[in-house]
Amino acid sequence: MERRVCKHGVEPLYFMARITPYYDTAGKISGVVATFVDISGLTRSEEYVRELHADRLNSMAEMATGLAHELNQPLSAIATYLKAIRRLLQLPLEERPASIDEALDHATDQIMRAGRIIRHLREFVADGEPNMTHESLHNLIRDVFELTVGGVKDAKIQMVLALNANKDGVLVDKVEIKQALVNLILNASEAMAASPRREITIATSLVESEMIQVDVSDTGRGLSGLDQRDPFEPFLTTKETGLGVGLSISRLIVEAHYGKIWARPNPAGGAVFSFTLPLAAADADP
């Protein structure tokens, strides 16, 4: 039986056993036959899903304050608009201004905004098997922007989107790709804790003919604190707190989607974390 070598050494093998007894003519057990089925692959898959979900919950804990702030804004705005509408409705019909319709439209917009944030949140914390679907990578990035923008605002960080790729269709598990993006954004945010200039740029571009590249750039401390070690190595971190598994989870996700991920210094100061994904067949060049 082949055993693969992983980062922790030789991977263990897992078997499921089925015991079948045999009886003699007197009805007594005369022997047994044991059948073993290798379930190592299934066990590794289950562990992978558990690791992803645990990392997702850790990310949510880090984003909790920002999300609360981001949800509070539309809810406060809705309350303000509804109070104004109530006062206007108390006026005689002929004295009511046309601005009632405008206030209702603004309240509706804020309700939709709060609903989007909650939907993104529910999708992000979902615990389930990978589900590959055709998605717009730019839309996934915008979803993650809505999830994380509150936290980066609280940290006085400016986040810029430069979605320049003219093709962005990908076949992915959208929750996993969002998780990889959130991890990179949180990593960038924490790297700028002591920086006078705090800016995260998420950019896309096409590379070769069948790949799209995402660059998450920051203006933080850069990669010098890692002493040339692999920043995606599990449990490697320069943070005062944290387990250092976010980047390694991101690498697992990207590589499971047939892409690659790497880091390099940012010429403007800081670091750039990049990854590629294959374009879906409909968007790839023939």
Image (spheres, grey):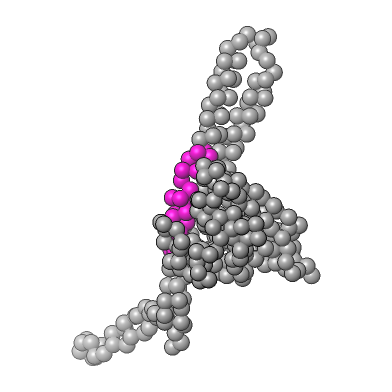
Please give the name of the residue rendered at 47% of the width and 56% of the height, measured from the top-left corner. Answer: 56
235 w.r.t. 113: above or below: below
| Residue at 59% over, 60% down | 271
Up-down relation of residue 240 to residue 251 (above or below): above
Q: Magenta segment, which residues?
A: 50-71
Closer-to-camera residue (160/5) = 160
Q: Which quadrant is the N terminus positioned in?
A: bottom left
Locate residue 278: give its quadrant: bottom right
Using the image, determine if residue 39 lies above or below residue 68.
Answer: below
Q: Residue at x 56, y 34 (%)?
A: 74
In this rendering, the count of numbered labels is 0
Residue 77 image-quadrant placement? top right
Residue in front for this viewpoint, 89 or 268: 268
Q: Position of residue 265 (x, y in %)?
A: 61, 63
- Decide whether the magenta segment is chiefly helix, strand or loop: helix
Residue 172 in view in this figure: no
| Viewer-proximal residue among 101 and 206 | 206
Residue 284 % position (x, y): 75, 66
**From this viewpoint, is residue 3 visible?**
yes
Q: Quarter of the image for the C terminus: give it.
A: bottom right
Please tell me whether residue 67 belongs to the stretch shown in magenta.
Answer: yes
Kindly indicate the quadrant of the structure image that contains residue 257.
Answer: bottom right
Looking at the image, residue 127 sits to the left or right of residue 256; the answer is left
User: Can you give x and y, in whole percent of width and height, for residue 224 in the image?
Assistant: 53, 64
Q: Is residue 61 magenta?
A: yes
Residue 188 coordinates in the image, percent (x, y) = 55, 55
In this view, 12 is above or below 141? below
